[in-house]
Amino acid sequence: MSAALPVPSRALVRRLGVASLVANVMLVITGGAVRLTDSGLGCPDWPRCTAGSFVVHDAMGIHGFIEFGNRLLTFVLTAVAILTWVAAMRYRPRRSSLRWLATVMLLGIPAQAVVGGVAVLTELNPWVVSLHLLASLAIICVCVAFLRRVDEGDEAPTLTVMPVVRGLGVATFVVTWLVLYVGTVVTGSGPHAGDASSPRTGLDPESIAQLHADLVCLLVGLTVGTWVALRVSGAPERALHAAALLLGIEVVQGAIGFLQYFTGVPTLLVGLHMLGAALVAAGAAWLVVGMRDRGPVVEAAVVERALDPVPEPAFPVSDQTQSAAPTG
C-alpha cells in the first residue's frame, strides 16, 4: 500500500515542517490560555477528563471546556506530526537526518502529553508545569532544526562563521534557555500558576522576577554582541538575518515583560509574553543552525541520473563491419 503513495516533494516536506512548527506554537498559546483562565484543573483527571468520562460535559463549566480544548489540540498536533514523519520517511533520496528529526518531533508529543498528565495528577505542581511548557519549547527547536535540514545537504557540517562567533551564538542559545526556565518559575510563583487553588513554588515573586529580568538583559547583550561580531566578520546573510530576527523578538518580548510587571501582570499581556517565549526559542534555534552549512541539497532527479547506466548506441557497429569504400 505504501508503494501507491506518491513520493513527497521537498516543498511539501518543508510545508509540513512549517505546519508542525505553527501547531506547536499554538499549543503553547492554548496552554497559556488554560493557565491564565485558572482552567488547569478544568479536567481534573488524566488521561480521562474525569474519572468517568473522556470528554467534558456542561456541568464542568467554562474551565472544563478550555482545558479539554487544549487537550483536543494535541490530537491535531499528532496528526500533523504523523504526516510530517511519513513525508520524511518517503522522501527521496533517503535522508536519515530528516527521518531522525521527524521521529523526535513525533515522539515528543506523547512525552509532552504525559508530562501534562502528571501535572494534572499532581494538582498542577508548579515544577511539573514548568517542564510541561519547556517540553513544548524543545519540540519547537527541533522543528526549526528540521526546517533548516530540509534546505541543506547531508555533508559534514562546516562553520560559515568564525569559531569565536559560533561560541557567542551557542552562549546566546544557552542563556535563552535559562531565561525561558526562570520565566516558568516566575509564572509558578505568581498569580497565573494554572488554577486558583494550585500550589505555588513558595519563592518570592519579586526576587525571581528580578533574576529573570537580569538574565533577559544578559541575553539581549549577548545577542547584540553576536550580531555585531557577525557583521564585522563578514558572515553570511542567513546568520545576520537570524541574529537580527532574534534581537527584534527579544526587544518586543522584553517590553511586554516589563509592561506586564508594572501593570500587575494582566492576562492579555501574560498571554502575549508566552507567545513571545515560543518565538524566542525558535529564533535562538534558527540562529545556531544558521551558522553552519552542510552543502547543497541533492535532488532525486540528480541521483537518478547518476545511477542511470550509459545508454547503448542506437545503431551498434559490429567489429566485423567492413569499409564501404571501393578497394580498387
Image (cartoon, helix red, strand yellow):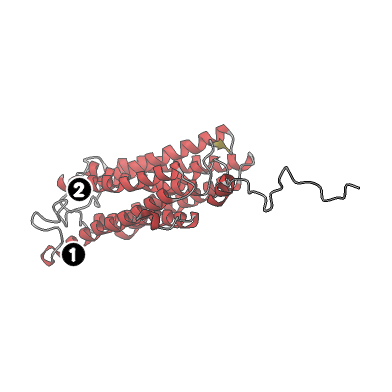
Residue situated in front as seen by the camera: 316 or 140: 316
Q: Judge left or right: residue 241 versus residue 134.
A: right
Which residue is depicted at the point 29% across and 55% down?
A: 32
Residue 264 visible to an observer of this rendering: no
Q: Judge left or right: residue 294 versus residue 51.
A: right
Badge 2 marks a residue whose secondary structure is helix
Residue kind at label 1, given as amino acid type: Ile
- Which residue position holds label 1? 62
Residue kind at label 2, given as amino acid type: Gly
For the residue carrying disc 1, how many other residues have a C-alpha within 10 Å: few (<14), some (14-19), or many (20+)?
A: some
Could you say where residue 38 lies in the image, as x and y percent from the top left? 21, 56
- Which residue position holds label 2? 117
Badge 1 marks a residue whose secondary structure is helix
Which residue is depicted at the point 28% across and 43% down?
A: 131
Residue at the extreme right: 328
Q: Vertically, is 162 above or below 99?
A: above
> Counting residues from the N terminus, which is met first, the one under dot 2 or under dot 1?
1
Could you say where residue 119 lies in the image, as x and y percent from the top left? 20, 46
> Which image quarter: residue 59?
bottom left
Residue situated in front as seen by the camera: 148 or 58: 148
Task: Name the quadrant of the N terminus.
Answer: bottom left
